[in-house]
Image (cartoon, rainbow, N blue to C red):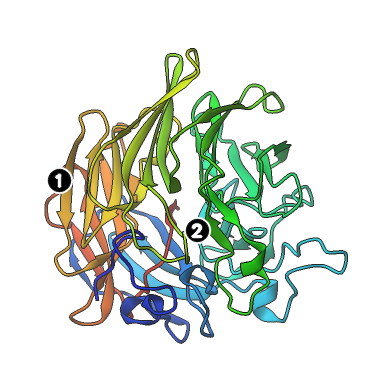
């Protein structure tokens, strides 16, 4: 079975993630000195870590499985090891209620299955409903991380690191009581310095947001919390599409983090993942994968998401929207050194391929993976000049013919060409979500 994107007509939620490479693996493994086809660039020295759901028991939805990190250590042109480890949160180790006795959320109860990021010397496994969990680069769980007791909130799975200031920007959401959303900022040393509420009309599924050099942009979109599903017998994602909620983008100036948020109405849609955003004169340009609607009757994926652009004219108070491509894609990534700045390229996952979009020219180059199902592609910069073509894209690719997986390395200067190296892993890596390269 090849992997569709989140949006390429997946079967119903109760079925697709139990088959093929969506099915979990049964145990943890460590293997050394992995076989390689081609040559690993000697400049690569670090860890590639990727998170995803790997439920120990059957669950109602792909998003609800226990988190498992799959990692490869690359050093001196060799693949030193592969490891997979569950994130051992408090609720993984023992029964840990979702709510405290006073009715507040228990933020240490977590699946930690969505992302893994590194900031201020700490590597954090993330899920948006809970606190982050710190892990080591050898994938051992250290414990829940609350920024020295200063974070009493969930943390988005999509924080943004400013390449200029080193600050970590993120938000938390999930409370059925106002404020439903809170914006947070940590400085380059990991000290939490900003916590401010964001006023929204209801609790919505705010999965991602955008950052520019001067602004934060919140996505208040019409997939709304449904209490009847939350308290129902079947564990499903407790959110549904709303025809009446509307859709809007909220703009906050980074220089005034406690100031007013300006809201701009847009056509109803949903966005799981932002590619990038940047300032351009009096405007903000934002690119993301857009769904025309989602989860009207069930939390499945029966419509495609495609790459769109929003141009927020701050002077005129208006937004222009346009579709950039018609290919079904998901998981867009850029060179993270350009987060919040003008980036030329974003690479997204298509069907059996990676697609690199030239955001300045509107063209796309496809890296064909044959029958392989692709995971997210992460950019690793090369030494020397800071250029988006000087580096490599890394990602896990499933090979259905041998029911196994590889870590594929593609030269950014020859994106459509053959991989420079393919690291063969000792087991398949189930389809998952997000990861990062952590440089040694």
- Among the 4 quarters of the image, the one containing residue 29: bottom left
For disc 2, the marked residue is 115
Q: Which residue is outermost to the front?
A: 244
- Among the 4 quarters of the image, the one containing residue 395: bottom left
Residue drawn at point x = 32 percent, y = 75 percent: 33
Quote the CA–CA distance across marks 1 and 2.
Answer: 28 Å
Q: Is residue 135 left or right of residue 39?
A: right
Q: Is residue 112 above or below residue 315?
A: below
* Image depth: mark 1 or mark 2 in front: 2
Q: Is residue 341 above or below residue 11?
A: above
In the rendered image, residue 296, in percent from the top left (x then y), is placed at 46, 59
Q: Which residue is outermost to the right?
A: 102
In this view, the residue in front, 334 or 10, is 10
Q: Is residue 280 above or below residue 98?
A: above
Secondary structure of the residue carrying tag 1 is helix
**Mark carried by residue 414:** 1
Q: Is residue 75 left or right of residue 219?
A: left
In the rendered image, residue 51, in percent from the top left (x then y), is placed at 47, 64
In the rendered image, residue 127, in percent from the top left (x then y), is placed at 57, 60
In the rendered image, residue 80, in percent from the top left (x then y), is placed at 36, 69
In this view, the residue in front, 318 or 336, is 318
**Does any portion of residue 312 appear in the rendered image?**
no
Residue drawn at point x = 28 percent, y = 64 percent: 4
**Does any portion of residue 121 appear in the rendered image?**
yes
Mark 2 or mark 1, which is nearer the start of the sequence? 2
């Amino acid at each position: 079975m090849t992997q569709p994107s989140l949006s390429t007509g997946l079967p119903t939620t109760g079925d697709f993630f139990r088959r093929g490479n969506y099915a979990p693996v049964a145990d943890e493994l460590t293997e050394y000195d992995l076989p390689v086809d081609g040559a690993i660039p000697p400049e690569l020295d670090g860890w590639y870590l990727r998170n995803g759901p790997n439920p120990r028991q059957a669950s109602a939805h792909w998003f609800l499985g226990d988190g498992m990190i799959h990692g490869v250590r690359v050093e001196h042109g060799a693949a030193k090891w592969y490891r997979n480890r569950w994130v051992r949160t408090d609720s993984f180790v023992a029964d840990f209620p979702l709510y405290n006795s006073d009715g507040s959320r228990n933020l240490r109860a977590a699946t930690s299955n969505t992302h893994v990021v590194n900031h201020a010397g700490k590597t954090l496994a993330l899920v948006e409903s809970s606190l982050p969990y710190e892990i080591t680069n050898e994938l051992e769980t250290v414990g829940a991380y609350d920024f020295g007791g200063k974070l009493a909130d969930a943390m988005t799975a999509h924080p943004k690191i400013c390449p200029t200031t080193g600050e970590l920007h993120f938000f938390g959401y999930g409370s059925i009581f106002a404020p439903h959303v809170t914006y947070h900022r940590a400085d380059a040393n990991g000290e939490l310095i900003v916590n401010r509420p964001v006023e929204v009309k209801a609790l919505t599924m705010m999965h991602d947001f955008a950052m520019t050099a001067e602004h934060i942009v919140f996505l208040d979109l019409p997939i709304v919390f449904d209490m009847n599903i939350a308290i129902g017998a079947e564990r499903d994602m407790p959110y549904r599409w709303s025809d009446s909620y509307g859709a809007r983008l909220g703009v906050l100036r980074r220089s005034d983090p406690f100031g007013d948020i300006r809201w701009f109405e847009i056509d109803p849609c949903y966005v799981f993942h932002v590619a990038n955003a940047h300032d351009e004169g009096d405007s903000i340009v934002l690119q993301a994968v857009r769904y025309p609607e989602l989860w009207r009757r069930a939390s499945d994926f029966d419509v495609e998401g495609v790459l769109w652009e929003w141009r927020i004219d701050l002077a005129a108070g208006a937004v222009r929207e346009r579709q950039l491509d018609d290919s079904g894609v998901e998981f867009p990534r850029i060179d993270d050194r350009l987060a919040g700045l003008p980036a030329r390229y974003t690479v997204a996952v298509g069907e059996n391929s990676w697609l690199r979009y030239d955001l300045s020219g509107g063209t796309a180059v496809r890296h064909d993976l044959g029958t392989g199902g692709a995971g997210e592609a992460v950019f690793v910069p090369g030494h020397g000049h800071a250029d988006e073509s000087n580096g490599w894209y890394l990602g896990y690719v499933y090979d259905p013919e041998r029911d196994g997986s590889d870590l594929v390395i593609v030269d950014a200067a020859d994106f459509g060409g053959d991989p420079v190296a393919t690291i063969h892993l000792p087991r398949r890596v189930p389809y998952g979500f997000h990861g990062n390269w952590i440089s040694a």
